Image (spheres, coloured by chain):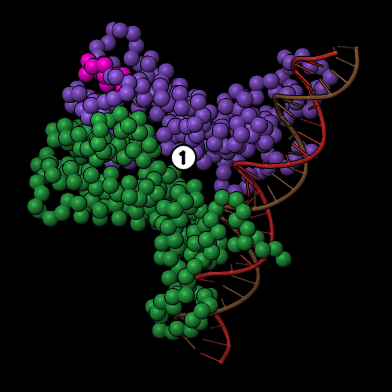
Chain colours: A purple, B green, C red, D brown
Amino acid sequence: MRKPEQAPAKTHPRPRKAAGRTASSRAGRGRRTSRAETAPYHHGALRDALLEAAERVLERDGLPGLTLRAVAREAGVSHAAPTHHFGDLTGLVSELAAIGFRQFNAAMAAACGGGELSINERAMARAKAYVAYAQAHPGMYGLMFRTERLDYSRPSLHEAAEASFAGLAGAIAAKRQEKISGDALTLDQAAAIARAWSLVHGFTMLLLDGRLGDIVDRLPEGCSTEQLLDAMLKTTVMKD
Amino acid sequence: MRKPEQAPAKTHPRPRKAAGRTASSRAGRGRRTSRAETAPYHHGALRDALLEAAERVLERDGLPGLTLRAVAREAGVSHAAPTHHFGDLTGLVSELAAIGFRQFNAAMAAACGGGELSINERAMARAKAYVAYAQAHPGMYGLMFRTERLDYSRPSLHEAAEASFAGLAGAIAAKRQEKISGDALTLDQAAAIARAWSLVHGFTMLLLDGRLGDIVDRLPEGCSTEQLLDAMLKTTVMKD
DNA sequence: TGTTTATCTTTACAACGTAAAGATTGTGGT
DNA sequence: ACCACAATCTTTACGTTGTAAAGATAAACA
């Protein structure tokens, strides 16, 4: 009864057999203490478990490996279980992206720290945290910024992504010592925001795609990508 | 027997039966044994026809619609025909991306024009051509810059992409009135190149993803994205 | 002319997303 | 306590995709 799934995966995808999951599923029906390690018919917190499994699959196998069935295997449930919680692949991916945006925002907020940093130092710290998050979680960052399968009409995703934008705009406003009136921008303000975001986002994308490799390889001895980022930002960030 | 191909298309994809296909005589060879109406078994120039079909499919249906079978349908051949010419989907996509890079480079070179522009004007023209190409061919641009399924070990793709980088680096060098010694860069030079590329690339990606919508909507009356790009570049491009 | 080779088609298979129906368990009403 | 109902998870099924392999056809070549 359990055989049609978890097939050998003969072609190109990573075999990467699911580790555990052997004697678990059909074991105890009688006792229902909800503390047992055995997987009962009702998981109890499958939705969160699926999202965690999805993040593992994403960072391990990359975006093309992030499939509904792979996530279900990773979580140890039937291949159709995710559908019930997320509707379809777009739903799962969008909820995962929302988590990513929250992590991302938290990382940048933490980098800004308390009040012991100057405005300029905070802007630099935020930019570095931006790139650092993407390097630490390339799968997540790719999911958030390069997938067409995101449904921004989902409140959780829309909200988390909006917070990301608001944080950026707020930082720019603080640097210019202006207050942004939520509904209107001058051309200069808009250009400053677009410039900062485009610069950091573009650098991150090119870096993750390995397209800056040609540049990094030609740097003087001992120069890292962080120094490159630093040098790149120094003239631009300082002048807004 | 079953007729698994070409009939159903029940869900979203377009049926779009092969239309023309009569003018496939296409000379090229000494012998024209091709019947006037019926398609000859041997196409004659299927490789190029597939690439053109792929570009049509891409711009019409987007990246997710660009499948081997869809391209074969568009070209009016069997679903396995592309495999013979490109090996696999990565091969087809990579060759198409190479074409995209060549179009892209040609567009930027044309925008720089002859010698009637100043160095700064040429840099601006190049940046605007960059964004304009992406807006005119969003599918192609997405294919070139956001797909993981590219095989840069293919000479055609590697070469075309390399030319893109060389053109950019050359433009920066011209602006700084330096000559770049192909094998080494100072940190300042590298930062200038990374800055220009990141800025334009990031802006383009955010624009195509609709993530600048919040900014554009808050612009003063009658401000277009071109003006935003202009304002964004003006301070930065001018100072390198 | 006959053979060989390149090109295209047919057939086949595993993986995928998704819909629908069945099985199991938690929950609320009486 | 009991039972109907709803939520959760599994099975089954279908159409899609990429890709391998074998068959058919036309061009090239001896």
Residue A107: x, y in percent? 40, 19
Location of residue B221 by image quarter: top left
Q: Which residues are magenta?
A: A169-179
Residue B55: x, y in percent? 41, 57
Residue closest to the eye, A194 or A17: A194
Residue closest to the eye, A200 or B110: B110
Residue at screen point 43% across, 66% down = B49
Residue B140 drawn in magenta: no
Residue type highlighted by circle 1: Glu
Spot the residue most to the front. Answer: B221
Q: Is residue B17 left or right of residue B137?
A: right
Residue A173 drawn in magenta: yes
**Quadrant where the C terminus of chain B is found in the figure:** top left
Q: Is residue A114 left or right of residue B182?
A: right
Location of residue B46 by image quarter: bottom left
Q: Chain of mark 1?
A: A
User: In this picture, is B176 found above or below B80?
Assistant: above
Q: Is residue A96 left or right of residue C19?
A: left
Residue at screen point 9% across, 42% down = B177
Q: Secondary structure at mark 1?
A: loop
User: In this picture, is A156 found above or below B165?
Assistant: above
Q: Badge 1: few (under 14), some or many (20 or more) residues near its Cα, within 10 Å?
A: few
Q: Which residue is mark 1?
A: A148
Q: Is residue B150 visible?
A: yes
Residue at screen point 60% across, 23% down = A48
User: In this picture, is A65 found above or below D25?
Assistant: above
Q: How many marks?
A: 1
Location of residue B114 by image quarter: bottom left
- Main secondary structure found in the magenta portion: helix
